[in-house]
């Protein structure tokens, strides 16, 4: 009998660094096949590196055997990546919005050589510091004309991704030196402080939960531009967030010309 394909993915992703996880090899020794020289020994390696709001994935599939490996796919999509947050909500899927040919595709990997796939995940302020899970799936249906159980290949392990603490919040023309701290029972009270240089000493902020504005306020500082004046904002999650979700505080001012938002700074809180 053909031995089952074994996939075991290990991946650790930190905002400021990149680690590598490698699969146990997919190994078949030819027992029970019509091809006495059938030998498959594939290893899957995955790298993930974050640069600001972009995560770059690299998938490397290497043929460790002494014979070539011919993989067949039922479409132009050869792999899938799915990322979920710590509440099990999907926040990224490689194939979403992409179009693949529906014709069968083949991929030859010579003995001792490898192939690479690259993917770029561009994420916004909703993707905050925390744990994320990544599923990586190789979608081959046969190797050297031997059928592979799709369940074995599609059901990859779930990997916990730990993102580092929030990056330093960049200054702009209206806000600078922003710091965030939390207090209260279970850390539900956030304190956002910094300096503002705003027209007529007025600025605005909004609290956004999962893309929905739940609080919008206008505040003032002691002196208007061109003076930099200190400000402090207190956000109590018990008052603004009725459900758990991604929480962002957005600082901004309204343009004196057309009333649009400008000098926006998005600060992930949760």
Image (cartoon, rainbow, N blue to C red):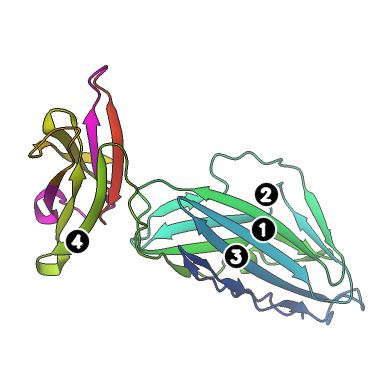
**Residue occupying image coordinates x 17% and y 52%:** 193
Cβ atoms at labels 2 and 1 below 8 Å apart? yes
User: Whole-percent x and y of residue 203?
Assistant: 16, 35
Q: Which residues are magenta?
A: 231-258
The label on residue 77 is 2
Count neighbours of disc 3 (C-alpha within 10 A) and say few if under 14, some if 14 to 19, many if 20 or more: some
How far across and how far down the image is residue 71, in percent? 79, 60
Picture disc at residue 139: 1
Q: State the SS at label 2.
A: loop
From where the camera sits, is residue 248 visible? Answer: no
Left or right for 105, reference 173 = right
Task: Judge by depth and name the residue closer to the eye, 137 or 214.
Answer: 214
Helix, strand or loop for disc 3: strand
Q: Assess whether residue 234 is covered by the magenta stretch.
A: yes
Which of the 4 image quarters holds residue 221?
top left
Q: Which residue is mark 4?
A: 181
In front here: 146 or 16?
16
Count neighbours of disc 2 (C-alpha within 10 A) and say few if under 14, some if 14 to 19, many if 20 or more: some
Mark 1 crowd level (few <14, some 14–19, many ≥20, 10 Å Cα): many
**Is residue 76 something that shows in the picture?**
yes
Front residue of this view, candidates 253 and 100: 253
Q: Is residue 215 above or below residue 24?
A: above
Residue for badge 3: 47
């Amino acid at each position: 009998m053909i031995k089952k394909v074994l996939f075991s993915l290990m991946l650790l992703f930190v905002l400021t660094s990149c680690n590598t996880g490698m699969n146990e090899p997919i190994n078949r020794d030819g027992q029970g096949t019509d091809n006495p020289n059938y030998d498959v020994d594939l290893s899957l390696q995955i790298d993930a590196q974050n640069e600001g709001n972009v995560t770059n994935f690299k998938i490397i599939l290497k043929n460790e055997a002494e014979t070539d490996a011919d993989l067949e796919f039922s479409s132009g999509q050869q792999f899938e990546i799915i990322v979920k947050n710590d509440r099990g909500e999907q926040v990224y899927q490689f194939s979403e919005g992409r179009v693949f040919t529906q014709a069968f595709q083949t991929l030859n990997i010579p003995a001792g050589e490898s192939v690479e796939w690259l993917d770029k995940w561009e994420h916004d302020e909703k993707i905050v510091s925390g744990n994320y899970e990544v599923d990586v799936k190789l979608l081959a249906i046969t190797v050297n004309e031997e059928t592979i159980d799709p369940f074995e290949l599609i059901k990859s392990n779930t990997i916990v991704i730990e993102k580092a603490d929030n990056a330093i919040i960049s200054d702009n023309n209206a806000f600078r030196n922003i710091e965030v701290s939390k207090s209260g029972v279970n850390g539900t009270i956030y304190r956002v402080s910094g300096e503002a240089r705003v027209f007529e000493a007025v600025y605005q902020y909004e609290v956004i939960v999962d893309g929905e504005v739940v609080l919008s306020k206008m505040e003032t500082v002691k002196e208007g531009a061109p003076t930099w004046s200190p400000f402090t904002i207190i956000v109590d999650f018990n008052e603004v967030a009725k459900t758990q979700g991604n929480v962002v505080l957005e600082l901004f001012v309204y343009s004196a010309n057309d009333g649009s938002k400008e000098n926006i700074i998005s600060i992930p809180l949760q």
